[in-house]
Image (cartoon, grey):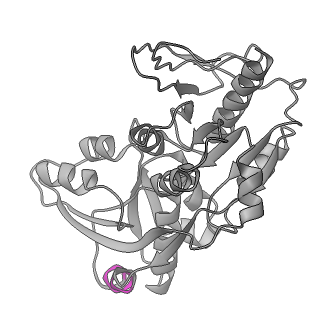
């Protein structure tokens, strides 16, 4: 049922009353052409909620969708795996290992789960030196939490910003007075320059290394894509995945589902590309992502009943 007004809503439909103070806030964004509204609420799925007739498309690189699929299965949600992106290491990765073994930095900044995985490989190759790390949010921190105990002894996760964005991290990263403070920032070649620009303005000395890049997969299985067009929700974890999906569906009017993003950065990219019904958690991470997917599915079910 189409609305004649544009609405931007940070409300998600509550499927059952949530327990107090335990659920993160979610933002739901509708993109239509005229007016804007905003509000906030939290939501959760109830044990009696059934999503058996709905499917979620998971789009991370092959082999990296397992945790999300398992978490959604616990809610009775079926998934369709359609990898849309792949990661490629860049020459700066070797430089990263060399720097870690020979140089000490005041801070090392990691801003995505993939950047964390790439960093850990280089860190081990460098001999596992002691490092102090700032991460952008809980999703990135979880990669270090899952590392071996021997790794945790030498990696100090010393800072997480109040909001999981590069700009906020750059504005809040601690700096001791006018002392020289060095930052190593290993990142995707496609990451924005918010981190190094923001830190440089505050007097940090920043070295950015583009250790990997994210590319669209060269081949998508046509049969799986045909099934994906009828899915209720597509789950995406990066602007690159959003871009790949938009390119795939640009010539089709058959897809009318929602987009559940891992965080605000990806959601903002989805909006810029003209997608509507975009959901994301206030705090990036697996549980927040799952809750946003459940929100999107709940609304999709209600629309089908209208």
> Can residue 217 be seen by looking at this rendering?
yes
Quarter of the image with the N terminus is top right
**Residue 262 location (% of width, % of height):** 56, 44
| Residue at screen point 47% across, 27% down | 31
Q: Is residue 254 above or below residue 108?
A: above
**Residue 46 location (% of width, % of height):** 83, 23
Q: Specify start and end residues of the magenta stretch as a single range.
A: 94-100
Residue 209 located left or right of residue 281: left
| Residue at screen point 39% across, 68% down | 131
Q: Quadrant of residue 80?
A: bottom right
> Can residue 286 be seen by looking at this rendering?
no
> Residue 201 or 34: which is nearer the viewer?
34
Q: Is residue 150 above or below residue 29?
A: below
> Residue 178 or 110: which is nearer the viewer?
110
Residue 243 located left or right of residue 198: right
Say if the magenta span includes residue 141.
no
| Residue at screen point 15% across, 55% down | 200
Name the residue furthest left.
178
> Residue 274 or 190: which is nearer the viewer?
274
Residue 147 located left or right of residue 241: right
């Amino acid at each position: 049922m189409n609305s004649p007004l544009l609405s931007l809503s940070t409300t998600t439909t509550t499927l059952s009353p949530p327990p107090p103070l335990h659920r993160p806030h979610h933002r739901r964004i509708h993109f239509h052409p005229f007016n804007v509204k905003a509000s906030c609420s939290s939501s959760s799925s109830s044990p009696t909620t059934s999503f058996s007739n709905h499917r979620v498309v998971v789009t991370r690189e092959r082999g990296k969708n397992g945790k999300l699929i398992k978490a959604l299965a616990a809610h009775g949600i079926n998934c369709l795996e359609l990898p849309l992106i792949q990661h490629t290491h860049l020459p700066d990765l070797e430089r990263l290992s060399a720097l870690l073994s020979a140089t000490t930095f005041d801070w090392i900044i990691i801003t995505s789960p993939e950047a964390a995985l790439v960093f850990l490989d280089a860190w081990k190759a460098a001999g596992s030196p002691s490092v102090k790390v700032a991460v952008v949010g809980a999703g990135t921190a979880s990669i270090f939490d899952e590392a071996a105990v021997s790794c945790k002894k030498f990696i100090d996760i010393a800072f997480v910003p109040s909001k999981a964005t590069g700009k906020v991290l750059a504005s809040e990263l601690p700096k001791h007075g006018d002392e020289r403070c060095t930052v190593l920032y290993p990142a995707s070649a496609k990451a924005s320059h918010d981190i190094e620009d923001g830190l440089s303005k505050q007097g940090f000395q920043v070295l950015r290394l583009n250790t990997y890049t994210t590319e669209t997969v060269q081949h998508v299985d046509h049969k799986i894509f045909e099934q994906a067009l009828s899915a209720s929700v597509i789950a995406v974890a990066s602007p690159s995945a959003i871009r790949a999906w938009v390119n795939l569906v640009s010539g089709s009017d058959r897809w009318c589902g929602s987009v559940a993003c891992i965080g605000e950065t990806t959601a903002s990219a989805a909006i810029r590309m003209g997608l509507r019904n975009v959901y994301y958690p206030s705090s990036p991470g697996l549980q927040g992502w799952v809750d946003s997917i459940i929100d999107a599915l709940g609304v999709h079910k209600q629309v089908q009943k209208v």
